[in-house]
Amino acid sequence: MNASADESGKQSELMLRVREAYLRTRELRSRLAALRSEDLHAPGSQSLSQSLSQSLSLRARAERQAADRERLEAELATKLELDAAERALSDAEAAVQDSLDGNGDEWMIGVGSR
């Protein structure tokens, strides 16, 4: 019975890893969407930047370009972080599946007795 309790605990731990990884990917997707939305709504974005660039001073253009670079760098960093989080989620899901495949239905013994 102790072995089945250990397996049940292991399953719970693996499922918790999946949940944490999923929540992390969801958070990063939201952050990436916000960064992209911010980029689309930025005052100097797309065609507006062409018309404004003629009337802006060199200093204002440099500041705008620096802000654009910062947004792009933040977006890239978030993309990389999201890729890593998605790999962690996939690994956690695979660990759960491996655990389930390796134990058949034995891990379920005692699950309903909590």
Image (tube, rainbow, N blue to C red):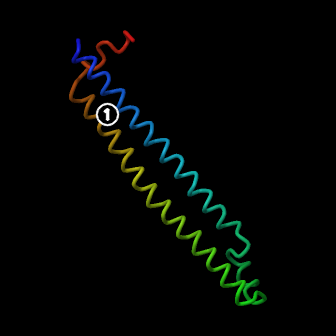
Relative to 55, is 31 on the left or the right? left
- Indicate left or right for 36 with 111 as reference: right
Residue 62 on image: x %, y %: 66, 84
Q: Amino acid at mark 1?
A: Val
Q: Is residue 34 or residue 59 the one in the foreground? A: 59
Give me the residue at 65% from left, 61% from top.
37
Camera-side residue of 60 and 94: 60
The furthest residue to the top: 113
Q: Quadrant of residue 63?
A: bottom right
Residue bearing mark 1: 96
Furthest toward the right, the residue is 55
When the figure is inspected, residue 60 is found, relative to residue 29, above or below; the finding is: below
- In the rendered image, the vertical position of residue 10 relative to residue 3, given as above or below: below
Residue 45 percent coordinates (x, y): 68, 74
Q: Quadrant of residue 38?
A: bottom right
Relative to residue 62, is residue 1 drawn left or right? left
